[in-house]
Image (cartoon, rainbow, N blue to C red):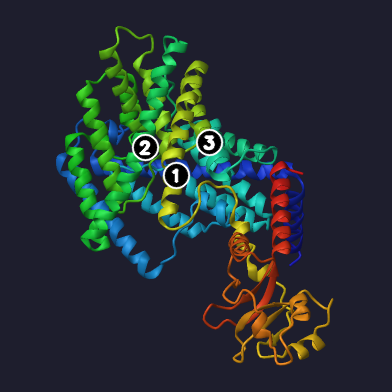
């Protein structure tokens, strides 16, 4: 026991320091980033090993970059991988029916709380999907596990809600930085997509997490986007006209891709096939597409590296774009696990090259090389699907080292982001939340609003009277100045309405008058599970400054009373508290 007590004291002291000192929070961010980098290295190595063994690839060869793959394995491996994913999904639905929470949802609704067990299940499913050749990326699994590491560390030290959200962002920053060997890309992925804002409070932990993760990648040589793209030529002001047009085209194609995934899911659901069979058929379809071009398989790193540096005919580019889009929609729509991050980058690069070829056909000459349009298209389509224009801008900067190229990417990305927001309103992640009924458009913390319920704000000490009480008795029991309003119930003790004390004393209804003649808001009630937002809407609709809280619309048992003034004051206090947390005050 003597050795345990000093350890517990040291942990308690460390917890206090982390809660009170931003430097220690930054150190924790670096630790989370390093752990996320290790997890990314492990997952990447496992899937690459699976590709080599299952598809008989040479050492160092990537699946999507292979031009000759055994045809039997192209059909068999994705189908068997789909069958395994389907069986796992069926088993989880029966024995572990919980829906996993990803980092964006965790930070938006749950204060950064994530389940490590659920995250590991998602990671395993994603690795099986990618390892079997499904057209999905590992970035979602990297971010899932990285965010869970940050959440668990924050829970272990009982950190504040905002600090927990920052460490979840730090974990995802490390994960994405490891995926692309790009620390600024990872950091701004966290700022834009997982934390939802940039501030001085979250700057150090997130940047240190991304830097630590890249250090781990360099140590283990596990980077997947380490090659630099050389940009030649210049970008003139007149060249921004086609660049902005490309951004608009990529936005529309990104919306079409997201719709295609949902449409595929709807078609699969209408077939009423067993869950375990859906992914097997999906794998067979993806394998069949791989027979036409193996470049549609897996995330597409090998195909991307080849496509950015080699010339391809227009027909080949268009065909590959269609096949890859179909493979991604089928993979996700039939139940494979994974994300569209890298697939959207690859598809965007294809759109950019196709756009450059079409532009060369209709113009005499252009000073912009096709690789510029490929990178612009890559970033603009990824912004449409994933979100985060600054994230993609820094990815372009870290991949090319060219400031003019980055400025062009920013311009196209802004056009893409604005177009998607005005015409569609969601990124792929938030679109999936919308389909589930969650009104999430970003990772900005709105969970506190859901926790601020009517049940928590209402005043429980409420006197009530029967509706058949005479006005004489009511005036005797409630003299002027005693209160403002009184809740009225019927003979079954159910809510009947509210009577205003001033009206009751001023009413001229005769000696036999009762409160039933003066009731207001008989059908306007609040429920304890309503959020502050719902309550404010009810106050506006009822045109009342106070409403009764009942247990349910059926039983109508009075639980308390809530005034609009108090609700708005609590809402204002919480808003101010969040503002101070974001600004670091």
CA distance separating discs 2 and 3 = 22 Å
Please indicate whether residue 551 sits to the left or right of residue 217 in the image. right
Seen in the picture, residue 581 relative to 487 is either above or below; the reply is above
Seen in the picture, residue 435 relative to 311 is either above or below; the reply is below
Name the mark on residue 426: 1
Dot 2: few (<14), some (14–19), or many (≥20) neighbours within 10 Å?
many
Q: Secondary structure at mark 3?
A: helix
Q: Is residue 540 visible?
A: yes
Which one is closest to the eye, mark 3 or mark 1? 1
Q: Is residue 221 visible?
A: no
Name the mark on residue 254: 2
Please indicate whether residue 460 sits to the left or right of residue 322 in the image. right
Residue drawn at (57%, 51%) of the image? 107
Question: What x and y, as percent, mark residue 133?
Answer: 28, 43
Question: What x and y, as percent, mark residue 47?
Answer: 35, 43
Look at the numbered discs 1 and 2 and tell me whether their residues touch, using CB distance below 8 Å.
no
Question: What x and y, as percent, mark residue 337?
Answer: 36, 51
CA distance separating discs 1 and 2 = 11 Å
Name the mark on residue 186: 3
Q: Secondary structure at mark 2?
A: helix
| Sequence-wise first label, 3 or 1 | 3
Which one is closest to the eye, mark 2 or mark 3? 2
| Sequence-wise first label, 1 or 2 | 2
CA distance separating discs 3 and 1 = 21 Å
Dot 1: few (<14), some (14–19), or many (≥20) neighbours within 10 Å?
many
Seen in the picture, residue 137 relative to 240 is either above or below; the reply is below
Quadrant containing the C terminus in the rendered view? top right
Dot 3: few (<14), some (14–19), or many (≥20) neighbours within 10 Å?
many
Residue drawn at (77%, 91%) of the image? 473
Q: Secondary structure at mark 1?
A: loop
Image quarter for residue 514?
bottom right
Residue drawn at (33%, 61%) of the image? 89
């Amino acid at each position: 026991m003597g050795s345990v007590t000093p350890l517990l004291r040291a942990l308690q002291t460390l917890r206090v320091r982390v809660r009170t000192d931003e430097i220690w929070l930054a150190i924790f961010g670096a630790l989370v980033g390093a752990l996320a980098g290790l997890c990314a290295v492990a997952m990447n190595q496992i899937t690459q090993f699976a590709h080599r063994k299952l598809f008989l690839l040479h050492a160092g060869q990537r699946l999507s970059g292979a031009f000759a793959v055994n045809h039997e394995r192209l059909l068999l491996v994705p189908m068997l991988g789909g069958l395994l994913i389907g069986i796992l999904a069926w088993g989880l639905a029966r024995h572990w029916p919980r829906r996993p929470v990803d980092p964006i949802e965790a930070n938006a609704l749950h204060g950064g709380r994530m389940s490590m067990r659920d995250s590991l299940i998602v990671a395993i499913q994603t690795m099986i999907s990618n390892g079997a050749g499904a057209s999905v990326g590992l970035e979602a699994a990297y971010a899932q596990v990285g965010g869970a590491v940050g959440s668990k560390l924050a829970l272990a030290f009982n950190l504040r809600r905002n600090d927990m959200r920052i460490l979840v962002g730090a974990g995802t920053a490390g994960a994405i930085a490891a995926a692309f060997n790009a620390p600024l890309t990872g950091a701004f992925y966290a700022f834009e997509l997982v934390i939802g804002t940039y501030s001085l409070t979250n700057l150090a932990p997130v940047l240190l997490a991304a830097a630590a993760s890249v250090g781990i990648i360099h140590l283990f040589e596990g980077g997947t986007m380490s090659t630099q793209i050389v940009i030649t030529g210049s970008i003139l002001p007149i060249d921004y006209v086609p660049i902005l047009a490309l951004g608009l085209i990529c936005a529309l194609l990104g919306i079409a891709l997201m719709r295609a995934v949902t449409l595929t899911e709807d078609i699969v659901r209408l077939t009423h096939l067993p869950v375990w069979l859906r992914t097997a058929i999906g794998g067979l379809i993806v394998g069949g597409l791989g027979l036409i071009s193996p470049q549609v398989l897996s995330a597409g790193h090998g195909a991307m590296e080849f496509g950015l540096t080699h010339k391809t005919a227009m027909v080949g580019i268009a065909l590959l774009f269609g096949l890859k889009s179909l493979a991604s929609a089928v993979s996700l729509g039939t139940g494979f696990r994974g994300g569209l991050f890298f697939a959207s980058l690859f598809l965007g690069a294809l759109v950019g090259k196709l756009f450059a070829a079409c532009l060369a056909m209709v113009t005499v000459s252009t000073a912009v090389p096709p690789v510029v349009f490929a990178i612009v298209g890559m970033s603009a389509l990824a912004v449409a699907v994933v979100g985060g224009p600054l994230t993609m801008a820094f990815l372009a900067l870290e991949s090319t080292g060219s400031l003019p190229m980055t400025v062009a990417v920013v311009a196209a990305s802004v056009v893409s982001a604005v177009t998607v927001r005005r015409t569609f309103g969601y990124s792929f992640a938030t679109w999936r939340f919308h389909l589930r009924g969650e009104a999430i458009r970003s990772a900005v913390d709105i969970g506190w609003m859901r926790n601020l319920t009517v049940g928590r704000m209402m005043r429980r000490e409420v006197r009530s009277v029967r509706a058949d009480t005479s006005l004489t008795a009511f005036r005797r029991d409630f003299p002027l100045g005693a209160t403002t309003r009184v809740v009225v119930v019927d003979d079954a003790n159910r809510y009947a309405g509210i009577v205003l004390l001033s009206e009751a004393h001023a009413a001229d209804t005769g000696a036999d008058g009762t409160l039933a003649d003066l009731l207001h808001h008989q059908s306007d009630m609040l429920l304890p599970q309503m959020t502050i937002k719902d309550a404010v809407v009810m106050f506006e609709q009822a045109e009342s400054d106070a409403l009764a809280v009942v247990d349910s619309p059926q039983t109508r048992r009075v639980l308390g009373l809530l005034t609009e003034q108090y609700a708005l004051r609590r809402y204002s206090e919480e808003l101010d508290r969040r503002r101070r947390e974001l600004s670091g005050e």
